Amino acid sequence: MTSISYNPALEPRDSYINIAYTVKSWLLTKDHKRIGILYLIAITGFFFIGGVFATIIRLDLMTPQGDLVSDDTYNKLFTLHGVVMVFFFLIPSIPATIGNFVLPMMLGARDLAFPRLNLLSWYIFMVGGTLSLIAAVTGGVDTGWTFYTPYSSVFSNTRVVLTAVGVFVTGFSSILTGLNFIITIHTMRAPGLTWRRLPLFIWAHYAASIIMLLGTPVVAVTILMVAAERIFKLGVFNPALGGDPVLFQHLFWFYSHPAVYIMILPAMGVINEIVTCFSRKNIFGYTFIAASSLAIAFISFLVWGHHMFVSTQSVYGGMIFSFLSFLVAVPSAIKVFNWTATLYKGSISFHTPMLYVFGFIGLFTLGGLTGLFLAALGLDVHVHDTYFIVAHFHYIMVGGVVMAYMGAIHFWWPKITGRMYTEWIARLAAVMIFLGFNLTFFPQFIVGYLGMPRRYHAYPPEFQVLNVMSTAGASILAVGYVIPLIYLTWSLWHGKIAGPNPWKATGLEWQTPSPPPTENFYETPVVTGPPYQYHLEEVPFGPSK
Amino acid sequence: MDQASRGSNRDLSRLEASQILAHQFDDLAQQKEASNLGTWAFLATELMFFGGALTAFVVYRTFYADAFAQASREHMSIPLGTINTAVLLCSSLTVAMGVHYASHGQQRKLIFMLLATIGLALAFLCIKATEYYIEYSHQLVPGLNFHYPPHHHAHPERLTASPPHVELFFCFYFFLTGLHALHMIVGVGIFSFITWKAWRGKYSEQYYNPVECSGLYWHFVDLVWIFLFPLLYLLH
Amino acid sequence: MSTPPHITKTTYFKVFAALMALLVITVIATFIPWGSRIGIVIAMTIAIVKATLVVLYFMHIKGSSGLTKVFVVAGLAWLAILMGITLADYHTRPWLSGNPPMTIGPQER
Amino acid sequence: MNQFRLFPEQASTASHQTDALYIFLWSLTSFFTLLIFALIVYFAFKYRRTSSIAPQPVRTDMRLELLWTIIPLVISLFIFFWGAKVFFYVYHPPRDSLDVHVIGKQWMWKIQHPSGRREINELHVPVGQPVRLLLASQDVIHSFYVPAFRVKQDAVPGRYAVLWFQPDKIGEYHLFCAEYCGTQHSKMIGRVVVMDQQKYQDWLAGTPAEESPAVAGGKLFESLGCIKCHGEKAPTMAGLYGSRQRMIDGAIVEANEQYLRESILDSTARVVAGYAPIMPSFRGQITEEQLMEVIAYIKSLRDPATLRKSD
Ligand code: HEA
Ligand code: HEA
Ligand code: CUA
Ligand SMILES: [Cu+2]
């Protein structure tokens, strides 16, 4: 979208940051950029909390008998790790921070359609998060992030209701964000910004928002039923009253499977923006990537039963779910191949965001392909609920989504803060994360196939070697995640001034000062062409050494 | 909305409507479209919210068909349920009329309709409460005093169904109607707020969007009941 | 596009009358011994007709933008997916094993 | 058992099938991962930034798009059929299996053999003999998992689940509970001992004779008062198991374990055509173990035509 019909004044006059400094001006802001920052801070906090849980898990698993913590504590640790990472970090990660910040700018809008709702969603999120953290410190919860009944509804004597309410509440923040995005994309595009000219980031968020809007309420009401069952001793999922525990699994996964695509779709959106920018090329297969996002969103609602192959679900049901799970792999494959093709005949530079993108593509491919192992009925019977599953989803969620999230932070950091970070440290951290990650989670594929069940506090001694490797990797990973926290914070004061468009990127968000003014643009941009017209743009940095 | 036309006449409408136009929108049409679509998207969410619980109900209903039918036949009051449905349908009419008057700028009639709606909603809730009370006194509230077969029933010999299945029916009965009643209470809150605004003359022919959107919400609550009524009271 | 509702007052009253009539019919139908299957079909058909009337007229879907209609259809489609596939599981369970679909356990609360 | 390995031991007929699929999938995964990896590395260096002139745009090639839509689709479908084939094998117990009763509870597996011998957290089975487990749970969901056999099945409270395998290698293997079930989930482990037929017979004979479940069930049938009705005003149990029963609503149901369970616990939910719904519910009056015994008794009265080898 280089061909913007005006030439904006790019000197920062009154950026969204320096327009007011009081705490109140932040907590009562309706500016999507400030709300994005609020989310960013909250989410970073949750990530490190979840990471501390993970660290203790890994330390405990160094020895077969697990003597660091007791079994009850261990059970609470992985539950809270899962709950925090999924509901309070990964689901809001890209949409609520980066999405919130750049989506309206990419559309050339002054704000989201419902700014007040947007702020509300942050408060709801914080209330939900606080409730869950209160549950964590006042006794914890030990049901696993999946809350399977009847364990959660009748047998567990931990803080299930409080945690459930926390997750329930947070669900609404996700719904509100999704709703806001959908309506904004429909009604607030800049003049000339037709659907076929939308950046693929927008398409991806649109698809993810559909899932948030139509999936989240189902898990909300399901969790409500579990809470009601605990409080009023109802029998909705309790076999003693004729209830069916497997029905809970249906309702839970109806949301929670699509939820994994709430996480991955925005990540895929990020990849499109970065890969084009650092190879100075238009995206290969625009239509296919956009359509595959929608296809993923739709098919993702049809495959939930692949988590239930051995749950006494009908064998035929299992076959349908397996079949559809294979179908959902195809649009993902399309994306991977198109990103790779985008590199072809490009002018590629290796800046930090691009390194994360390479990491993403590789690890997502491996994680996604191991998803096919799980979708294959007969094989899943063996690997279900083993560390093979743990490896699969960390490959996608940590290797994929978190990589993309880090890439996004590094890509838009100059836009968000107006400062550059120190490139070489950033590259170093990216490489460390990549290596540490593989060392942590690859051994888990093997130990999983050997039969080590997940959620095991103690395990037979022959699995120890692989577990120690995993723990070693996790410590590298931990350091890798702490480094960016340091240099990014440092850059806030000492980083080089970035200027409006340090990467010479084409998106509308780059055609305004960094950090942007409150209403994003001094003049509403007009769009006259498709996105990613990099051949019209000058190349920054020149040849790479 | 047609994108090309978005830029046009924005300055004009901006001046006129600076009071009611939020800063992020270009003109009133855009704002109205956004809030209308937003409401519909919200209703889709609500649909899935009730849908999750309804799915569970339907699953059990197909497998414990006899027990559920018996529970409904022996313990649900069709007269009260019918009256309540009628009350709710009336309130839907008053809401529709309210929106109609709002779009014609007829303030007094709008306020009248809104008050009528609130009245009908309260009537519904009272009847519902009466039903709950009756069920309570018949020992039919799971988790509180469920006892089956209950002590006072005219034809105890007809109560052959397995008690847990009847209890399951009542779990769903209270869960679904409770959730619905909660939505009604929220609706009463919304309409009270709208009435107050209307009283203060905030709405006009140009700007009555909040009335319309809360109307949509109310109709949705009505729709839920249209399905709950046969599912809980009538499927014998 | 959200044009002002062009539905007249008379239409509202007609729709309302129809809704009331359907309410009466569905209640009466309950007391006729059709056999359980047909009874369910009748009651649910009437409910769907009522709902359609409300959506079309009271909620102004008739004459509203295509996009709004898409939202409505999407909501319904997703609900159908949820119910349809879940029920499909329960109904196909007996196929292979001959099992009745569900049963309850001996444990007491 | 302590050396480093990539595969668990292969000790059942299913394990070979599962491993074959697994190896195929890893080859496929390596192929695609390396392909993507190689392409990225190749492009990244071939087209690394060498000048400040922007490259010309490349047009989307429809043939390529179709290629990489169709190839993954075909491969996926192929894996689907393969996976389904293995699944059907794992879920289709043969007729001549040995029926063993397994009840999961927090946190142990209680096992009873047809001969009456009971064990806890251990399962002894003869090699080469298909074994069919009837799984129940007394409290929460557990999952019976033997990695060496590549089989796993959740034991869900409130219903029976079935798992079968045919061990083909003598040895001792891990038994895990794979579904999270509370505090001692990771201690709900044990072993499966596969022995040759002779040793197995010796092992069975090695303990003082215990009452077989069928006999115990017969006694329960009297003491619980079933016998008072069954025989005259209620259907006979002889030849019931494995037959097809017509219900009062016209449905036809195969009388398998699950059906018997439901009939006993919740008789009025499914009434046999031609009878009145007078049978009392036995829920809460009978434990999971007793229930399995009564069912074993009813099974022992079956039509000999449907007999399994082991009975
Ligand atoms: C962001 C998260 C995310 C994503 C995107 C995915 C993506 C996929 N997942 Fe995963 N999954 C999880 C997160 C995720 N998953 C989690 C958290 C769990 C565990 C939950 C729990 O129990 O706690 C889980 C569990 C899980 C299971 C259940 C296992 C079990 O419990 O027994 C299954 C089974 O089918 C599955 C399958 C898949 C498939 C087929 C994909 C596909 O979408 C992947 C598609 C991608 C590719 C295929 C790669 C790219 C393609 C190519 C490079 C071309 C070559 C392609 C072909 C030849 C087809 N996943
Ligand atoms: C959504 C995202 C997400 C993310 C980002 C992670 C990140 C990590 N996860 Fe997690 N994980 C899940 C989602 C996620 N996980 C889920 C859903 C489950 C299933 C839960 C369940 O079964 O219910 C799970 C389960 C799970 C298990 C299995 C537990 C079990 O089944 O018994 C393990 C074991 O290794 C693990 C490890 C890790 C590690 C090492 C990381 C690392 O990537 C984390 C790295 C980050 C840090 C380490 C933080 C930064 C560093 C510091 C703060 C250093 C200072 C700390 C100390 C000095 C203590 N995770
Ligand atoms: Cu039993 Cu885990
Ligand atoms: Cu899934």
Image (tube, coloured by chain):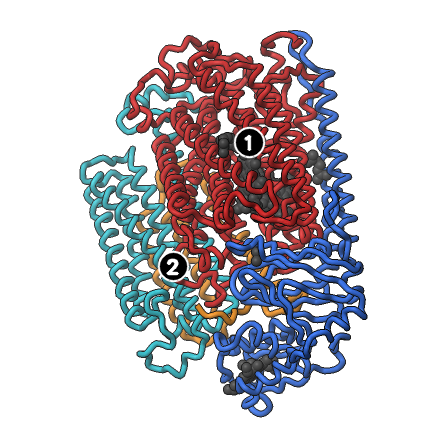
Chain colours: A red, B cyan, C orange, D blue
The answer to whether any part of residue A299 appears in the image is no
Q: Amino acid at mark 1?
A: Val
Secondary structure of residue under mark 2: helix
Q: Position of residue A213 (x, y in %)?
A: 46, 42
Ligand 1's quadrant is top right
Q: Do the dots labelled 2 and 1 sit on one chain?
A: no
Q: Position of residue D96 (x, y in %)?
A: 77, 71
Looking at this view, is B111 or A149 the one in front?
A: A149
State the quadrant of the C terminus of chain A.
top right
| Chain of the residue displaying label 1 | A
Q: Position of residue A325 (x, y in %)?
A: 64, 46
| Chain of the residue displaying label 2 | B
Where does label 2 land, which residue? Answer: B175
Q: Position of residue D86 (x, y in %)?
A: 74, 55
The answer to whether any part of residue D110 appears in the image is yes
Which disc, if any, is residue A402?
1
Query: Can you tell me whether the CB of the residue at mark 1 lies under 8 Å from the nearest atom of ligand 2?
Result: yes
Secondary structure of residue under mark 1: helix
Position of residue A481 in the picture relative to residue C51 (left or right): right
